[in-house]
Amino acid sequence: MVTFTVEDHDGNRQPVEAPIDMGLNLMEILKACEYPVLATCGGMALCATCHVEILEGKDELGHASDAELDQLENLPEYYPTSRLACQVRISPMLEGAVVKLRGEDN
């Protein structure tokens, strides 16, 4: 299991625990925890409705792919620490990260 923190649109932070052995991505975990993540494209990196900002732990997660960057750059507002939750795999690298929901902001 890995534990990370999610900051919602109101600034409230909650710890989230997720299994690392099921091949899930961050979007799937956020939806399972009933966070308001649209994920309109179902995790194909085509819509950017699962936009999150990695407030802590970005370096451990690696770089966004070109396809992910293309979607992020189409958003009205994105940040150097923006990622698509569907493209962040649940792994030990997520341990201790702080993830801020952004999808509803755009």
Image (cartoon, rainbow, N blue to C red):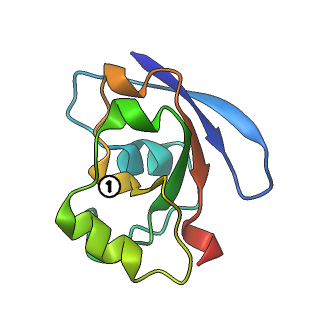
Q: Residue at x 79, y 49 (%)?
A: 11
Q: Position of residue 15 (x, y in %)?
A: 63, 27
Q: Pick out the residue farthest to the top.
A: 1
Q: Nearer the viewer, residue 7 or 76?
A: 76
Q: Nearer the viewer, residue 66 or 35?
A: 66
Does residue 44 show up?
A: no
Q: Residue at x 27, y 62 (%)?
A: 43
Q: Nearer the viewer, residue 20 or 100?
A: 100
- The residue that mark 1 highlights is 86
Q: Secondary structure at mark 1?
A: helix
Q: Position of residue 106 (x, y in %)?
A: 58, 78
**Up/down of 74 relative to 2, above or below:** below
Q: Position of residue 48 (x, y in %)?
A: 39, 72
Q: Residue at x 52, y 69 (%)?
A: 78
Q: Residue at x 27, y 75 (%)?
A: 70
Q: Position of residue 89 (x, y in %)?
A: 28, 39
Q: Is residue 16 left or right of residue 72?
A: right
The amino acid type of the residue labelled 1 equals Cys
**Up/down of 27 relative to 51, above or below:** above
Q: Is residue 50 left or right of residue 56?
A: left
Quadrant of residue 92 within the rendered picture: top left
